[in-house]
Image (cartoon, rainbow, N blue to C red):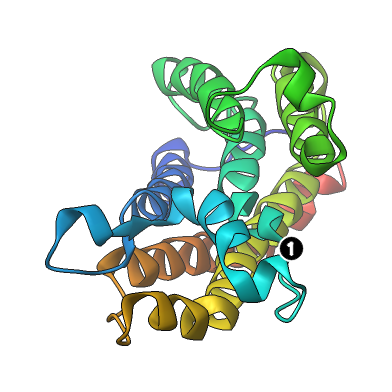
Amino acid sequence: MTRFASESRRPRQLRCLLIVLAAAVGLAGYYGPWVAHRAAGLVIIGLDLAEYVKFLPQVASGQIGVPRELFYLPLFAGSVTASLLASRRCLPTWLRWTLAIAAAPLALAMLPPAWSPGLLLLGEFRLQVLAIAVCLALIPGIALTRYLPDWSILVAIAFLALLAAIGPAWAFLQVRGAIAQVYRQQPPLGWGFWISLLGFFGEAFLAVAEILRPETYRRAGK
């Protein structure tokens, strides 16, 4: 069985903690303002964009072809990453439990506002429901993912982090002009947009750096 452990424990634990911290920074940016405005009611956070953009005329008419589900990628990536990291022994036990517990609310945050069981059966929300199901299934799946080799966990984390960084940022830049028409001016990019990019790109970089360490290959060969 190979996990994030063996060679000197303290440096390894620090590197694992940095990956967790980078993911937390990315999620903090996602919950921060992406559309900044002096009026609090006109500030839009990353989480709200998935619902907000479907009311933009250009998106509703198909003039701007942006899948709104892209804005849920940080939640999906965050939930899956939390479950994967919860299986790694390089992290303290209390943090592994915290990550396992946090995976559920991150997944459920993808539910539409004022949802009902009947609403979730609509085709519009099918992809969201599937993503939530995958995330929730991975939580008890920690009992199995703990046996996966380090490199596979790190590859998944790096890939998810890149999706969480690039997908929503690209989608947001596509609809930014339409949002500017609603505001009758181009609102500045909020700090949440930049912090989200920084956090998720940092997470991907740290995961890739860990993959490239010689110790990772030696552990995979055991």
Image position, residue 142 (x, y; %): 72, 20
Q: Nearer the viewer, residue 192 or 87?
A: 192
In the image, residue 6 above or below residue 152 = above
Q: Residue furthest left?
A: 38
| Residue displayed at 80% across by 40% down | 149
| Residue displayed at 74% across by 25% down | 119
Q: How many marks?
A: 1
Residue 119, visible in the rendered structure: yes
Q: Nearer the viewer, residue 204 or 213?
A: 204
In-image side of 113 versus 140 (left or right): left
| Residue position for label 1 | 67
Q: Nearer the viewer, residue 96 or 63?
A: 63
In the image, residue 72 above or below residue 137 = below
* Quarter of image, res 181: bottom left
Image position, residue 24 (x, y; %): 39, 46
In-image side of 119 versus 43 (left or right): right
In the image, residue 84 above or below residue 176 = above
| Residue displayed at 41% across by 62% down | 196
* Quarter of image, res 65: bottom right
In the image, residue 140 above or below residue 111 = above
Name the amino acid type tagged 1.
Pro
For the N terminus, the quadrant is top right
| Residue displayed at 67% across by 63% down | 163
Dot 1 alpha-carbon crowd within 10 angstroms: few under 14, some 14 to 19, many 20 or more = some
Image position, residue 51 (x, y; %): 56, 49
* Quarter of image, res 42: bottom left
Q: Which element is circle 1 on?
A: loop
In-image side of 146 versus 183 (left or right): right
Image position, residue 175 (x, y; %): 55, 77
Residue 1, visible in the rendered structure: no
Q: Nearer the viewer, residue 159 or 216?
A: 159
